[in-house]
Image (cartoon, rainbow, N blue to C red):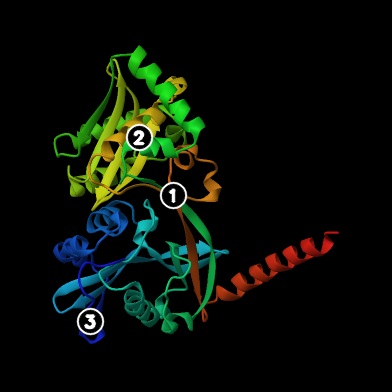
Amino acid sequence: MSAKAAAPKPGDLRVEVLEDEADLARLEAPWRALEQRVAQPSLFAGHAFIASSWAHLRAATDRLHLIAVWQGDELVAIAPFKLGVERLHRMPVRTLDWIAMWDGDRPSVLSTLPLASCWEHVGNSLARSASRWDLLRLLEQPADLPLPASLLRLVHHQTSADAVGHAIRLDLPFDDYIASIASSVRTNWRKRRRKLFEQEPASTVERIDATPEALPGAIERFVAIERQSWKGEAGIGVGADDRHRAFYLDWFGRLGPEQASFHFLQRDGEDLAGLIVLTQGRIACSRHITYAPAHASLSPAVILRGEVVRSLCQRGLIELDLLGMRPSAGEQRHKTDWSTHQRATTAHQLYRLRSRLLPIVLAKRLKQALRRWRGAASQP
């Protein structure tokens, strides 16, 4: 959230809530200009992601709720939320969520303001609209998120551990990075790589940038590999359904070839694995990876990731974000084995005090606390 420009004086700021789809298109130019001024902008708070998500992944009951903070005619912060309705505890509940919760990771406010100042304005706006929602969910945020008192006095605030993000340092030579990971992982990677590239000289890594001409074919190649794997059976990934394929085609098209690329590991013209890399500023993001299970003995995804990391270390980037991983997802060695550092995040759930949902939530929490207390008391 650090900014390149000096923070404006509070008196110069005004807050606007935008809920019309036309506003989303109207904000594109100032939103993209804001992305250029933020030191490390989040890919999942960018206009391209939000506009594509809204166009393809929203539910019929969802409504835009964009909070924009302006200094004069310059956009200095944007908080991309959506209002929706869900059935929770057998009753319809009005929810307010990040738009990036649909198919993204680490949603956030995009801002050149200091974090506390930004959340003062965003939080005050959320407080003013509190009569319109029962539950506000802020996922994958810092534990010490600086929510203002105006919002906190209206809600019952609960926090819990959320996804753990994994990342790889790119601001060092590739050989130094490889030397820093576990010896067993390094040895396995070298062995598999030698077997594939030395014994199979026809093996190559192909990079395809997301140009208008190449993008549709690259997506189809990636989806074809997904369909062979467990992702195809589970109905997840780029090819989860027609909506997701349209979303990725739209999103990557908006990002363009400078920000979106596909990497394929091939042998004799056959795709063994695929990896999608997105960049925003000096941060790269490993968005999706897949491999053909018929070639699992070669560890094609492991080999491909190593080759892509090698190439990224030469591009002046500082980090490859492997994105978040919740405990419920189970073990994901392709992230934990290769990451150099992690970031723990917190889920903040804010239940409006005057909501009919709150008594049920408190009752369930009390029941859970009593169960834990009884369990502890029964221990010798």
Residue 217, position in %: x, y?
A: 22, 31
Residue depicted at 52% across the width and 80% down the height: 353
Q: CA distance from mark 2 to mark 3?
A: 48 Å
Q: Earlier in the sequence, mark 2 or mark 3?
A: 3
Report the front residue among 115 and 367: 115
Question: Mark 1: which amino acid?
Answer: His
Residue 290, position in %: x, y?
A: 39, 33
Q: Earlier in the sequence, mark 1 or mark 3?
A: 3
Residue 267, position in %: x, y?
A: 31, 18
When the figure is inspected, residue 342 is found, relative to residue 242, above or below; the finding is below
Find residue 69 and name its label.
none
Report the front residue among 66 and 174: 174
Residue at which label 1 appears: 341
Give the crowd class for mark 2: few <14, some 14-19, many >=20 residues within 10 Å: few
From the viewer's perspective, is 125 left or right of 376?
left
Q: Earlier in the sequence, mark 1 or mark 2?
A: 2
Question: Mark 3: which amino acid?
Answer: Leu
Extreme residue in the bottom direction: 11
Dot 2 falls on a residue whose secondary structure is: helix
Report the front residue among 254 and 314: 314
Residue at which label 2 appears: 175
Would residue 59 be visible to someone looking at this image? no
